[in-house]
Amino acid sequence: MNIKWDVEYYSTPAGKEPAKDFIETLPVKLKAKVFRDIELLEEFGAELTMPHSKHLKEGIYELRVRLGNDRSRILYFFFTDREIYLTNGFIKKTKKTPQGELEKALKYKADHERRFSR
């Protein structure tokens, strides 16, 4: 039996959830596809690879969501044995991940680890 991963939204100290806020802005069909791909992440976790997931840098991964010509990315990191935190997201318009989005994800990961590591 496959044990599911726990996928959560990263929350800032002020209680904001940037990934959740981003997903809420998406058109209905793309939002539905994002949630289906999050279910894949819950099921496969670290074993989810291309074309659905890709490691970017320093423990930050991207969930690669595609619907027609729309491409969105949700950045995430692994925390404990079975926890995954979605940090932020963006609509992909260029080949490379925007540096600012990657830096945000790294900052959120460091913040979460600082606040919740035992």
Image (tube, rainbow, N blue to C red):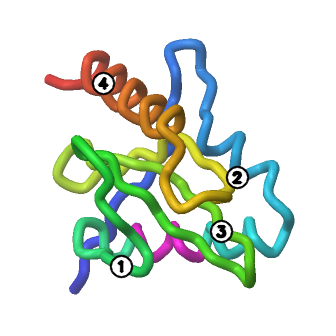
Task: Establish if 111 lies above or below 109.
Answer: above
Q: Which residues are magenta?
A: 36-41
* Residue 44 rendering spot, x and y as whole percentages: 31, 75
Q: Position of residue 70 (x, y in %)?
A: 73, 72
> Where residue 102 sits: x, y (%)?
44, 39
The residue at 40%/68% (across/down) is 42
Q: What secondary structure is marked by label 4?
A: helix
Residue visible at 60% across and 33% down in the picture: 17
Q: Categorize mark 1 by other alpha carbons within 10 Å: few (<14), some (14-19), many (20+).
A: few
Nearer mark to the viewer, of 2 and 1 = 1
N-term-proximal mark, 3 vs 4 = 3
- Lower position in the chain sequence, tag 3 or tag 2: 2
Q: In what element is the residue under mark 3? A: strand
- Residue at 64%, 49% (x, y): give it: 90
Please, what secondary structure does the residue beneath circle 1 have? loop
The residue where tag 4 is placed is 110
Residue type, numbered disc 1: Met
Label 3 or label 2, whichever lies nearer to me, is 3
Answer with the quarter of the image where residue 31 lies: bottom right
